[in-house]
Amino acid sequence: MKSFILKVFFLSFTAMAFSQAGHIMQGVGAVNMSMGGAATAQPLDISGAMQWNPATLSTFNDKILKLDVGLFFSSPELSASLPAGMLGPGAPGVSGSTKDDRGMSPMPALAMVWGKEGSKHTFGFSVFGISGFGVTFPEEANNPFSATFNPMENSNPINYPQTAGGFGHIESDYMLLQVGATWAYELTDKFSIGIQPNINYSSLELAPNPTASPTMAGYPTTNKASAIGFGAQFGLFYDSGFGLKLGASYKMPQTFFKFKFTNTYLDNTTSKNEFQMDYPGIFSIGLGYSEGDVDLALDFRRVDYENTAGFTNSGWTSTASVAGFGWKDISILSAGLQYKGINKLPLRIGYTYSSNPIPDELTFFNIPATAVIKNAYQFGFSYVMNDSWKLDAVYHYGDSNGSTVGNILSPQMVSPNNPLGAIPGSSVSYKMTTSMVQFGISYTFNK
């Protein structure tokens, strides 16, 4: 039974790419990130405006080009334990932890806006990396196939070699790039509407691949597969003229074609399988207030995972592959403050809270989703070089506020009273912190 205890569970490693609120990056660009991602009713820069509310683009009356590049670093830690007897008659229990050693991942954002004073129309174009990281968990050296195996020392059964009932080296590489064309229209001098059609490109590589059915050789690794997706976003924006601003937007689900994987097993046999993973619909409402040297922003978002392909289903299929993430809908709260009292040096602080989409009973199915961050803190600033050039910077720190904990699951343990196959006395958990430094530069034409 041990060959199934650790091999068969939901390791859809795309989840490691989801860096902040489940699958949702909390912000785009240094300015928006420094405000905790809040921009639905407080458009401080063009990137945040196009990401969260296309109607707010009407506030920009110039031709502006903006580029941001971030370096993102995560520190996930995976822990697991098995009770005595699971590795053989009379064998003691084992437990251990494994830390990720992937290093840094880049996070780009490019945006351009065409605005004109006196015109009711504003147009924008954006290319945002809205999700795209990965995980690298090395194989456990202290494993039952090692001549020096010591079950009394730290020994993480999840990372045992597949020949020893684990998964060995675990690695994923996921990227989601979104290209948007934005149009905002001023119905009045206080009220605007906006629309943004999107084309999305994603790529995914998994080792091993739990969306494929296992053979006697275990689970396979995949090639790098890609998928194209489509969607749109709509927004409303109201500026009272005396400081108060209101906004609302809805980003439709971004529907993707299926990933088509070519799999290779440890015995060099091959297979093919498909897996669809869409981007969820997001409803956002925002409140902004500006007075003198102070800009305040507060956003609330609701993310619809429960009706999104790839996230709706959960549990085992009849062939011991994985049906889906089984994530719950989540809420996100973003808040930011900008102070402009220092000449040419506006300062910003931001905070983001997110609920956890992973139900406790499905912790095991979501082991690679360690990048779910509950609390995130940001500090940023800009330096206004002249009327045309501006530099931006932000530092981000996030934490998962403790571990997500559940049982190890096995399809051989499934019964009417145990539908997920929970193994009594076992446990699996993960926690993490994230950090990021991001820099941006913008150029305003004809200044």
Image: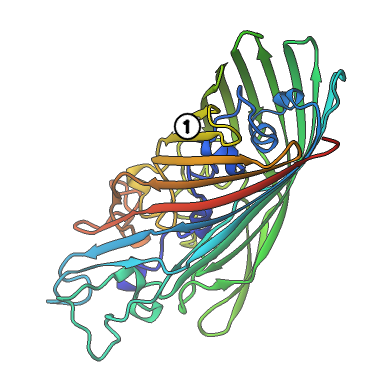
Tell me, what colour scheme is on the image? rainbow
Q: Is residue 21 visible?
A: no
Residue at screen point 56% across, 21% down: 286
Residue 39 sits above or below residue 139 on the image: above
Residue 182 sits above or below residue 162 on the image: above
Viewed as shown, does residue 169 lie left or right of 343?
A: left
Q: Nearer the viewer, residue 211 or 70?
A: 70
* Percent of width and height locating residue 288: 56, 19
The amino acid marked with disc number 1 is Ile
* Percent of width and height locating residue 255: 69, 43
* Percent of width and height locating residue 202: 67, 55
Q: Nearer the viewer, residue 74 or 422?
A: 74
Residue 30 sits above or below residue 219 on the image: above
* Percent of width and height locating residue 447: 82, 35
Q: Nearer the viewer, residue 411 or 61?
A: 61
Quadrant of res 260: bottom right
Viewed as shown, does residue 354 lie left or right of 430?
A: right
Q: Is residue 11 visible?
A: yes
Viewed as shown, does residue 185 lie left or right of 420?
A: right
Residue at screen point 83% across, 29% down: 115
Secondary structure beneath label 1? strand
Give the class, few, some or many, for how many residues have Cα within 10 Å of label 1's Cα (few <14, many ≥20): many
Residue at screen point 67% across, 38% down: 47
**What residue does disc 1 label?**
332
Can you name the residue that lies furthest to the front here?
343
Quadrant of res 345: top right
How many numbered marks, from 0 up? 1
